[in-house]
Structures are given as structure tokens and as C-alpha cells.
Amino acid sequence: MDFPIFHLDGMGNRMLIAVIAILHVLINHGLAVGAMPLIAFLEWRGIKTGDRRWDDLAYRFLFFCFIITTTVGALTGVGIWLSASLVNPYSIGSLIRIFFWGWFLEWIIFVTEVVLILVYFLTWKKWIGEQKEKHNRFGWALGIFSWITMALIVAILAFMMNTGDWKNKPSLWVAFFNPLYLPQLSFRTPLALVTAGLLGMFLTYFMIRNDRDFRNQALQLFSKWVIFFIPPLVLGAWWYWSSVPRAMTGHLATALTTMGFTEWHEHLIKGSMVGILVIAGISLLSLWKPNRVPRFAVLLPFVITLVLLGYFERIREFIRKPYVIPGYMYSNTYRLEDYPLLQKEGVLAHSTYSVVKNSKEITGANQVQAGRDVFMLTCTRCHTSNGMNGVTAKFEKMLGKGEWDREVVANYVENMHGSRTFMPPFPGNADELKALAAYLSQLRQNPEKSLGSQNEGIYGVPSKDFNLTLNPQ
Amino acid sequence: MKPETAAFAPIPHDLTLPLPVPREILLVLLIVSFMAHLLFVNMMVGGSFLTWIFEFIGVRKKSKAWDSLAHLICQTITVNKSLAVVLGVAPLLVINVAYTIHFYSANALTGFAWILIVPCVIVAFLLTYAQKYFWDPLENRKGLHLVIGGGASLLFLFIPLIFLTNINLMLFPERWAAVRGFFSALLLPNVVPRYIHFLLASFAATGLFLVWKTRRGEFVEVESFPEFSRDRLIRRFYKITFHATLVQLGAGVLVFFTLPTHGVTLKVAGTIFTGVLFVFLLIYLLKKEVESSPEEIGKRWGKITTIFTVVVLFMVSGRHLYREESTRWHREAMAAKTAEFIKQSEVARVAFEKSGGGLLNDPMELGKVTYKSTCSACHQAAGQGLPGAFPPLAGSEWVNDADPGKVIRIVLNGVQGPITVKGTVYQGVMPSHKDLLDDRKVAAILTYIRSSWGNQGGAVKPEEVAKIRAEVSSRASAWTEAELGHPSK
């Protein structure tokens, strides 16, 4: 990766993206894709029954969703771009080049969605009487566009994880035939609808304050909505869950064998079952005894949904490993086809931002520094030194707390991808491997924090030039 | 100073994938989408300031009229901000593609500030909503309400500075080496003048926007106040644009002359100065409009807005040409380096394929190679294992067992500690290799380890592996020592 390297050594770079992305997915699913049809349904019910209270409820619900989606929702969406491109410019830059028109189409649909929600929300109190039905149709249209946005994004995500066939078949249509596409979509759609219903149940307490009778009616309606979508949710989750390993063995052949994955996979099915049972239980209780449900109980399934969603996204990301773009680029951001060159001449020789410029310059004295450079270039996109997913902890687990033999460390790094198949092969040459091992083994005794460009500036400024001024004349 | 002669100017290599569309199309897309984005950003920022200022005047003068006007302007901010965000995604996407290295490098160098954009904008937007929807509930607590609106305005003041700093920083790779985070990048020439330029433009654009709103009758609510009759309102808004544009003349000169000169070519200067000619025309028209009679005022809005757009188009184009010119040397140097890299990579790849293409037919050779890549990370190069972590294979009773069935099972499904090897108990877990290695490779590895380092286990045939693989095909979990049974020597 030939960029100044942004690096968060504590929380780890991936955590930054994950926090932003999960928040975004939750809001997108629950408050847009799921909530818009629910709100249009409430409005429609108001029209049919002539009971103004349904219309008020729908408006209040929309108000909440409008505020959150146009602030946290929209900005976390942009935030995925900002964080992913900070952490991994080479891969995100390449992905944008490959999927340029896919993203462009996505953007156009996104603009439509935002315009529709503005219209739907801002005309609520204006388009009344004869115009009410037209207004309601906008609500349904908004629901459909929110769903299309998700369907398209899921396709792009699925496509990105495809066998690496994008080079031969660069049509986005291929994405829709990805083995994971339909399972994912049929999981996410009912999940979004259920989440929206749960949110409605929770918000009912705040949206209807005094009219207890109507509050119970609303609770029961939301419960019915949730219960109605539980069977498709179970089916969708089951389909997705059972197609993940197949998709993985399909193109990676290996990831299934990793312990970590097997563990996740098991946790996931157990977690999903518990989650869905809790959701169903609370919904049934609200249906029968709406007065008996403590208001924060409905938050519980909401939290479970959040955790499950996080798990699913984690797995989705895991499927890619050891690649970031299958068949083209490893997760360390080095391209497969450059490996022969890099493993011969070294990564330092081809990086602009390193203190040691070439593996030929590595002497005993600067070996640790060279190793630090190699670590920054080849490991830090996923690992930290001592923080989240830290290398120190990984080696401690294998080699214990004593001193680590450099040769053992080097041997491990050189060959780990053979059995830890989620790891990419080490891209550097033999001298760099030794330097990396020297750096890693001294990390135990000397737990330094590795800092990124945002703190230290760019690497590899020759020391005699270190006192550069910003505005030389 | 020529940038090429800077003390340290990094020349990285670029992405090797081709651009998805010709660069010219990207650049047109960039300018068009950026202008649309900027328009709404300007109206959002200008609207936020004017709302606050007018509300403040309302409080000071105890005037319901000013307060109502502020409230009306406040309604526009949230719509403009939603469009500003959604329209901002396109230029972000395009600049990523057209200036990949420059844009991303600048982002990384100011990383914390750059990612702070996300929470800052969220808070600013939430405050704007609070300002809008608590206007009436906080009627009697104006101080608190002004703090909310002021918070939003201050954030709107800060956020564009991050963007400006970054898109300025990206133009000057020759200075990247001296940058230590956002605040030092802020000190580069041109950042502050350009920021002032942007703020003035926000007021100018918002003035015209509000004239449009007034003429459409959207401010009819306040027109009953004598000081805000329609013509007076229009005049007031026009004056905002007029004064902002007058000051802009001075600010513009400052912006132009603080530009590092290596990017200022005749084309850049020509484009900008043509724009300036239109600014004079704009000022002339605005002056006439401000001075015209109550019946006449507002009629030149279309003409003025057209000229305003032309000015913006020239300025944005001039700015764009400057971006191209100032980075030209660097983009060319980078392209040369990238081409060289692609060539070197190709040569190395061909050589590698020629040398390593031979098929490994001999099981011992295949076993040795596969052992190294698959097993040696843990069991070490000479099968000696690692005390306390990984059991040895050399001299292991499991490996030397006359019947290879147990080791075949272990390789296929993995094994879960505790397991005793050569009298020592190991606690680790060995992963399954079922999907990773075919029968031939499992047999080759086992043949290799059973005949190396003093081991005497003997060869294993692929058929033996196939037989056991079929037997255990439904098993997913790792073996335990109890299930396998410790091999008795």
C-alpha cells in the first residue's frame, strides 16, 4: 500500500469501520427499509378506519425515523466511505474503480430516497383531504425505494465477494447470481421489518402518552406485525446461515476449516434461535396482555437483533479472507500478481513511506526499525501491536510469556497461511521476514505503540531533511 | 519554488487498475456534482448563520418580527442540509477515482480530523433539528435556544475547514513531509483565505436563495410586519448578497495571490479573471436592484442568479484547472513510476512462473513442500515442535504408529487437546485440513513426516486417506485423544 499509513493502534482500524457500519446497517434496516412500509401501513389504516389517532401515530413514528435517518443514518453511510478509505485506500480505491457504475446507480437511488422522505415527511400536514391517498402512495413508494437501495447494496457487497470473476465478467448482473445474494436478501428483508415492528412497540410508550386504550391497540398491532414476519425471518436466517459455509468452501476452499469460523457459526445459530424466541415471546405477550409488558422489555429483542446483525456482518467480512478483493488483492492490500516481485525485492524497496528504503539496507543496527516499517506496511490493516487483534497477544498465546525465539516467529509468519488459511502469505522477502521477526519478538519486552501518519506524519523522511518547514521559499 | 526540488517530495506508485471512464468525463462529473453539493452547503451554512443572527436581533430588540423571520429561515436549513449530504456523495466518489493518491494521502495525514467529520456533522444536524422543533417550546428560554442554534452554527463553521484543509493539502505533495496532523495542515498557504472566500460565498448564495423564497410568497407570514413588507424583505436579502460580493472582491485577490505559484498558469489566471469580469457585472446588477423602486425590485432575480452561476462556474473551473496544473508534475512522475512498477512486476511474475511451474510428482518432494507451507508454522521445520505449545512430530508415537489411521484422522479433522505426545501433555487445538488438502497431499505429507527426522512410520497411500475420508465425511468436530486412543508403542 503506497499511502501514508493511517493507523489506530488501540481500537484497531477494523473496529473503526465496524462501529460506523453496524450503526448504519441497524438504522438503515430498522428505521428505513422496515419502518417506511410500516408507517405507510399505519397511515393507510388511518384512512380506512377514519380514526385520526392512527394517522397521528404514523406521523410521530415517521418524525422519529426522519430525524435519525437524516442525521445518524446518512452520516454513518458517508462514514463507511470515509473510514474505509482512511484505513484501506488501496482496496477501496480499487473497488470504486471496479464498481464505479454500480455505486453511481446506488447514489441515484439514494438521492431519490432522500427526496422522497423529504416530500413524505414535509407534506404530511399539507396534503390532506383529497390528497391524503396520494400522500399515502408516496409512503409506499418510499418503502420500495428504501428496499431497492438495500437490495442494490447487498448485490454490490455480494459481488465484491465473488470468486474474483469480476475481471472477466465485469457486469453487475453477476452479483445477483452470487450464491449468497438471495439468501442474504431474504434474511435482511424480514429482519428489517421485524426490527421496525419492535421499534414501534418501544416507541409506542413515548408516542402515545395518555390514551391507554389506544396505546394497547397500537402495541397489539405492532406485535401482529412482528409475529407476521417471524416465519419469513426464520426461513431467511436459516437459508443464509446454511449457505454461508457452502459459499465459503465454494470459493475459498478453506475458511470453513478454521476454528474461529466454526465457533462463530455455532454461536450464530444458537444466538439466532434465542433471539427469535425472545422476540416471539415478547410479541405474543404484548398481543395478549398489552398492559403487562414492561416498556424496556421490548428493548431486549432490539439489543439481541443488534448483536445478531453484528455477527452476520462479521461473518460476511470473514468470508472474504484472506482477500480483500478475491483473487486480486489480499487483506494486507498487496496484489496477488505483485507477490513474485515483492517476495524477491521486498516490500520496502517498493514503498515510498518507510524509514528503511530497501531490504538491502537492513543491517543489524536498523533491523528493528526495518521490521517496524514492514509491520506497518503488511500487518496493520488488520492487526495492532498491543491493542485490538494485537500481534503480541497472538504470539503470547502460542509461544508463551517468555522470550520469543526470532526464528520460530519468522518461521510462523512465513508459513502461517498454509494452515491459518485466513491469513495472506507474507509479501516481503527473506531479509524483511527476519526484520519483522526481530521487531515482533522485541515487542514483548518493549510494548511500544505503533503510530500512524495522522500522528507522526509520513514515514521515511530522510533524517537530514526532518526539519522541513511547511512553507519553504 | 519548484515543487520537484522540494527537500522531500514523495512519489508513490498509483493504483494499477485503469480508470472506469475516461478522465475527462470524471473531471466534468466532478465539477458538476461538486457545484450542486456546494450550492446546498452554502445555503445550509448561510441559513444557519442568518437564523442565529436574526433571532439574536429579535431578542435584543424584543421584536416578534425578527424572531418570526429567523424561524422561517430556520425551516430551510434542514432541507438544504439533507440535500447537501446526499449530493456530496457523488463528488466524494469521483474525487476518489480522479485523484486517488492525492485525496487519500491528504485524508490519512489529517486522519483524526477527517473522521471527526462524521460525529461533528451528526451533532450539527441534531442541533439544527432541535433549533427547528424547539422554537416554540423554548419560546421563553431564548438563551438556551440561542445556545442550541449557536452550537450548530459553530459546527457548520468548523466542518468546512476540515474539507478545505484536506483538498488543499492534497495539491502539495512536496509539503506532505512537514505535516503532523490537521492543525499543521491548516497552516499551509491559501487555506484561511479560501475559507473566508467560502464563508462569503455562503452569505451571497443564501441571500439570493432567500430572495427567491420571498418572491415565491413563502415568507408571507412575516410580511404583515411593516419592516418586512415584501419589497423590504427582498431588498434586505439582496443587500446580503451585495455586501458579501463586494467584500469577496478583496478576499478573492487574497485567495489568488496566496496560491503557490507553480500551478498558476495563463489558463488558470485567464479563467479566474474572466470570472472576475462577471463579478463586476454582478455587482452592478445587484446595486441597481437594491436601488430600484418597491414595485420593480426582484425582477432582475433571474438575470442576477444566472450571472452568479456563471461566476461560480468560472471560479470552480479556475480552481479545477489550478488543481490539475499544480499536481501535474506529481501525477506525471507517479504515472512513470507506476508504469515502471507494473513492468517490473510483470517480469518477476513471468520469471517466477517459469521457474516454479514444474509439477511435483514425487511424493517425498510434494510432501516436503506441502509440509513446509501447511505444517511447519507450528510443528517447526525439523518436526521438533515447540515446547509448551506444539507437539513434536520427530519421534512421536502417533506419527510412528504402524497403522497410519490415527494421523490421517488427525490431519483430516484436527485434534483437540489435551493430548499426550512423548510423555508431555499439550493443550492446544489443531485445525481441520479436510477441505484444504486432497488425498494425494495428505498422503504425501504423512509419507514425508513418517520417513524424516529419524521417524520409521513408512509411506501412506492416497487410497488409505480416501478410505478414511469417506468414513469420517459427516464429522465436523476435531478428535480427542480418548476417541482416537493413545497409540501404544
Image (tube, coloured by chain):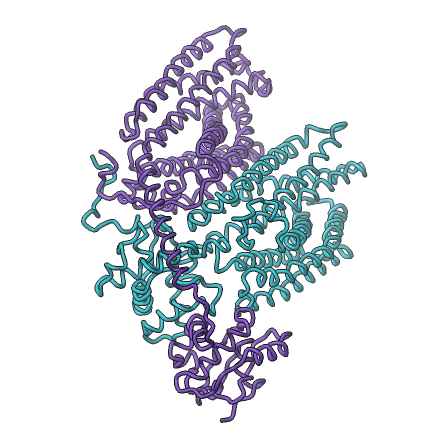
Chain colours: A cyan, B purple
Tell me if residue B14 comes above or below residue A235 in the rendering. Answer: above
Q: Is residue A90 visible?
A: yes
Q: Nearer the viewer, residue A114 or A394?
A: A394
On screen, residue A457 versus residue A173, left or right, reads left
Furthest-right residue in this view: A49
Above-or-below relation of A290 to B134: below
For image coordinates 64% across by 42% down, the residue present is: A148
Depth check, front residue: A18 or A330: A330
Tell me which corner region of the image, top left, top right, bottom left or bottom right, holds residue B291.
Answer: top left
**In screen coordinates, is A242 left or right of B336?**
right
Spot the residue most to the bottom: B489
Query: Does residue B59 appear in this view?
Result: no
Q: Position of residue B484 (x, y in %)?
A: 56, 85
Give the tally of numbered discs: 0
Residue B240: image location, x then y, percent: 44, 19
Q: Using the image, determine if residue A358 lies above or below residue B397.
A: above
Q: Residue furthest left?
A: A464
Residue A207 in percent (x, y) is at 67, 44
Residue B479: percent from left, percent from top = 56, 80
Q: Quadrant of the N terminus of chain B?
A: top left
Most foreground residue, B138 or A267 = A267
